[in-house]
Image (cartoon, rainbow, N blue to C red):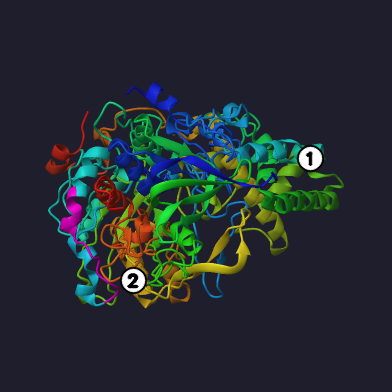
């Protein structure tokens, strides 16, 4: 039976109203198979209705203020700038991802908002301006106080923790973007025929397939 | 007529099957192909991998880049609906107990996202009590099950090699894929210290076996479920063909509340709640086959009390819910400096390890009674949420392109670090046999019900010294292998007696079994050797509940073999009108 046919026989809804018979009715014994309701199920194939609802709730509001987003953007582009291989965090829309992820994973909200606030207070005390309003040299001076965990002063520890989180979230957002996947060189996720480790790589690491493996494993 | 009533189905089926996973799916397949009329009831919604899988989606196509959620704990692309926590369906643990309970809710159940690891039991796995005096023997032997292992190898497909190992028996295998780079390195190192590494045995089609399922194209995303049906899911390989016979009515989003019985104590059907309209329905059948997963099926029996079954259906032995066991699990991993800055190529392969280590030692010479196998991971994985998280712990420790750097940082130098370390990770996990004990059990919680008004389960589980010592041995072994291959341990290396050597909580490995065990003696077992309830001859169990013990072999392949065997028996008995 071809797949299209077998897909058609799949029941797409609960057996409900079609088989609900009062005791007093004479039964029409034919089973009526109900089709799936025209709803979120069809618009989002493969998603659970609970997932669709959660996405709608998350996307219905904004968490970060414009000032916070500006700070996140500046920090993101310091962490992942444009280089000769690929673009910057902004190019990969990292700030938009960070806005989404703190709503999707609310445990990030306090560390992120608190860290941003801590950072602004540090800059206000040093430069009488919030981080995003400082000049580049001032921003880099501040970042250097919190970007190097093993060298940071003890009183900078909350900043180190915040910058670690920013670095990790920025990298996660960047390297899962189209720009970032290309940069780091992941070339999978495509139908292919796995014929083992390339010969030059085997040679490089002084490895080889055994005669048993060459005989028994699938080759192309 | 009020708004809330029980609606009785007029059609009487030959079999009502509860649960559409491995056991239930196989029962539906066998019975439907034998011409019997089946009602297959599934607690979750529809799922057809061809339509619903997220296979081949790129990381950026998930708004959370593949991060895990309550709905998909294994990650946003994973092919399983629900997991540890289901809205409206709580469970409890007694004080001091730490059971973690996975529940999938979808057509095909957890077989949509499982690891495809398909290991036969060996002869000893059925007779452990005769060997070490612990637990009990199965009432059947490998010889009883072998014909069914052979049949499902052919019907469903599994790759591997015949290695002439008594306890990792030969099968009818499709060719395995060649090992990956890190797997060749593991093999070289482990073999050098006396630990065998052989091709893995996964239910993935490296060759076509029929006209309805495709041939694997090595995207490493079996966990998302396969759109071309090249890996085994009950949804694609059993339920769809069963439906195609025209003999199966599939009811989805239906939570079975109890099994109904008559005054003679025989099963007559089930009562279920339709989750969409929250109304109650009853459907009748000549047999009732439970495949809702070990603990859910036990829960159903315990919630099906009647005058003839005052202790719960099929529970005159009082073992239903008891002897609960799971695979043990402990893991370790690190990085391989030799693999820094390595050449890029498509290394995906299949959705799992290409090699593994079957248990290789003699427990009589060790301080724990049961064995474990080792699963391996590593390579260029698709970047997902959490990619190289914590690089500040790595980039100050190892020279990058010959330069000693300061840990952490930012900028073009940091981008260089991410490229440098990509694909140099390796990990290993042990999956072992726990000893089944009566005092590890689940029971009905005395006062909590779920959102459907069905009493929930309360768990009492604790690992013993047998499992803790096994985990200690796993850690020692992993440490030796990692060291022998020049890897540096970066996680899992600090566990000790204070945390049971990193032994995962019971239930966490998601191979739960034992709660409706089979045996020859109705006083100490709930089922006979055909998975038929001693107390109720037209009631059967086809999931992990029936397992007396579980070897160090992931139980799915044995669930499938036993379900086929039991289903053939049911067909025979129905045709003879014995049940």
SS at mark 2 in the image: loop
Q: Which chain's residue wears label 1?
A: A
At horizontal 38% and vertical 70% (from top left) the residue drawn is B323
Q: Which chain's residue wears label 2?
A: B
SS at mark 1 in the image: helix
Q: Nearer the viewer, residue B428 or B144?
A: B144
Q: Nearer the viewer, residue B443 or B415?
A: B443
Residue picked out by circle 1? A132
Mark 1, other Cα within 10 Å: few <14 / some 14–19 / many ≥20: many
Residue B418 pos. (x, y %): 50, 42
Q: Is residue B267 located in the magenta-colored stretch of the structure?
A: no
Residue B534 pos. (x, y %): 32, 64
Q: Which residues make up the magenta segment?
A: B134-147
Residue B125 pos. (x, y %): 23, 63
Labels 2 & 1 near each other (Cβ < 8 A): no
Residue picked out by circle 2? B435
| Residue B344 visible to the viewer | no
Q: In which quadrant will I find the C terminus of chain A?
A: top left
Mark pair 2, 1: CA separation: 60 Å
At horizontal 57% and vertical 37% (from top left) the residue drawn is A21
Mark 2, other Cα within 10 Å: few <14 / some 14–19 / many ≥20: many
Q: Nearer the viewer, residue B127 or B54?
A: B127
């Amino acid at each position: 039976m071809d797949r299209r046919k077998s897909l058609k026989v799949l029941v797409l809804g609960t057996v409900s109203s079609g088989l609900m018979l009062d005791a007093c009715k004479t039964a029409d014994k034919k089973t009526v198979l109900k089709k799936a309701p025209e709803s979120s199920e069809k618009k989002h194939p493969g998603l659970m209705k609970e997932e669709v609802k959660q996405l709608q709730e998350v996307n219905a509001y904004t968490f970060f203020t414009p000032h916070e987003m500006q700070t996140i953007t500046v920090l993101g582009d310091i962490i992942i700038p444009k280089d000769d291989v690929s673009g910057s965090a902004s190019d990969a829309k990292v700030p938009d991802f960070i806005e989404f992820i703190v709503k999707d994973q609310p445990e990030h909200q306090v560390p992120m908002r608190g860290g941003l606030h801590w950072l602004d207070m540090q800059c206000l005390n040093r430069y009488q301006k919030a981080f995003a309003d400082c000049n580049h040299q001032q921003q880099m001076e501040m970042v250097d106080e919190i970007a190097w965990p093993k060298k940071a002063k003890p009183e900078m520890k909350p900043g180190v923790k915040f910058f670690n989180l920013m670095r990790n979230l920025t990298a996660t957002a960047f390297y899962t973007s189209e720009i970032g996947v290309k940069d780091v060189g992941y070339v999978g996720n495509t139908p292919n025929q796995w014929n083992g480790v390339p010969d030059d790589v085997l040679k490089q690491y002084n490895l080889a397939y055994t005669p048993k493996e060459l005989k028994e494993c699938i080759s192309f | 007529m009020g708004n809330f009533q029980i609606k009785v189905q007029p059609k009487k089926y030959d079999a009502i099957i509860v649960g559409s996973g491995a056991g239930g799916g196989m029962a539906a397949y066998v019975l439907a192909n034998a011409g019997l009329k089946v009602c297959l009831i599934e607690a979750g919604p529809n799922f057809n991998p061809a339509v619903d899988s997220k296979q081949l989606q790129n990381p950026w196509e998930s708004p959370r880049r593949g991060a895990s959620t309550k709905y998909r704990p294994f990650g946003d692309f994973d092919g399983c609906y629900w997991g540890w926590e289901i809205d409206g369906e709580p469970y409890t643990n007694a004080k001091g107990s730490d059971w973690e309970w996975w529940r999938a809710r979808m057509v095909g159940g957890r077989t949509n996202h499982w690891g495809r690891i398909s290991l036969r039991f060996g002869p000893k796995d059925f007779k452990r009590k005769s060997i070490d005096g612990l637990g009990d023997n199965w009432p059947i032997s490998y010889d009883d099950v072998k014909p069914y292992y052979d049949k499902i190898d052919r019907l469903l497909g599994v790759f591997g090699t015949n290695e002439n190992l008594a306890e990792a028996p030969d099968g009818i295998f499709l060719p395995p894929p060649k090992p990956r780079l890190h797997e060749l390195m593991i093999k070289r190192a482990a073999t050098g210290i006396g630990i065998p590494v052989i091709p893995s045995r996964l239910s993935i089609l490296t060759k076509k076996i029929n006209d309805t399922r495709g041939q694997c194209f090595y995207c490493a995303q079996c966990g998302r479920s396969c759109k071309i049906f090249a890996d085994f899911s009950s949804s694609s390989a059993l339920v769809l063909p069963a439906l195609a016979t025209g003999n199966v009515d599939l009811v989805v989003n239906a939570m079975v509340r109890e099994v109904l019985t008559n005054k003679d104590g025989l099963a007559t059907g089930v009562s279920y709640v339709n989750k969409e309209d929250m109304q109650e329905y009853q459907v009748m059948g000549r047999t009732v086959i439970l495949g809702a997963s070990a603990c859910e099926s036990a829960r159903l029996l315990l919630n099906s009390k009647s005058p003839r079954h005052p202790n719960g259906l099929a529970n005159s032995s009082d073992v239903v819910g008891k002897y609960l066991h799971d695979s043990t699990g402990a893991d370790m991993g690190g990085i391989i400096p030799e693999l820094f800055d390595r050449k890029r190529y498509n290394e995906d392969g299949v959705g799992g390890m290409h090699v593994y280590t079957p248990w290789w030692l003699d427990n009589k010479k060790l301080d724990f009674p049961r064995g474990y196998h080792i699963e391996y991971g590593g390579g260029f994985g698709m970047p997902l949420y959490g990619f190289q998280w914590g690089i500040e712990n790595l980039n100050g420790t190892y020279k990058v392109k010959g330069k000693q750097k300061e840990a952490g940082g930012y900028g073009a130098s940091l981008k260089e670090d991410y490229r440098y370390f990509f694909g140099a990770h390796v990990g290993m996990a042990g999956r072992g046999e726990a000893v089944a004990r009566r005092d590890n059990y689940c029971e009905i919680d005395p006062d909590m019900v779920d959102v459907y008004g069905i009493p929930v389960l309360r768990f009492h589980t604790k690992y013993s010294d047998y499992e803790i010592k096994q985990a200690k041995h796993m850690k020692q072994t992993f440490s030796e292998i990692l060291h022998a291959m020049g890897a540096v341990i970066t996680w899992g290396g600090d566990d000790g007696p204070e945390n049971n050597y990193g032994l995962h909580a019971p239930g966490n490995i998601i191979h739960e079994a034992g709660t409706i065990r089979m045996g020859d003696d109705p006083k100490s077992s709930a089922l006979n050797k055909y998975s038929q309830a001693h107390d109720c001859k037209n009631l059967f169990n086809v999931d992990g509940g029936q397992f007396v013990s579980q070897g160090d072999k992931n139980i799915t392949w044995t669930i499938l073999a036993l379900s086929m065997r039991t289903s053939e028996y049911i067909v025979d008995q129905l045709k003879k009108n014995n049940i």
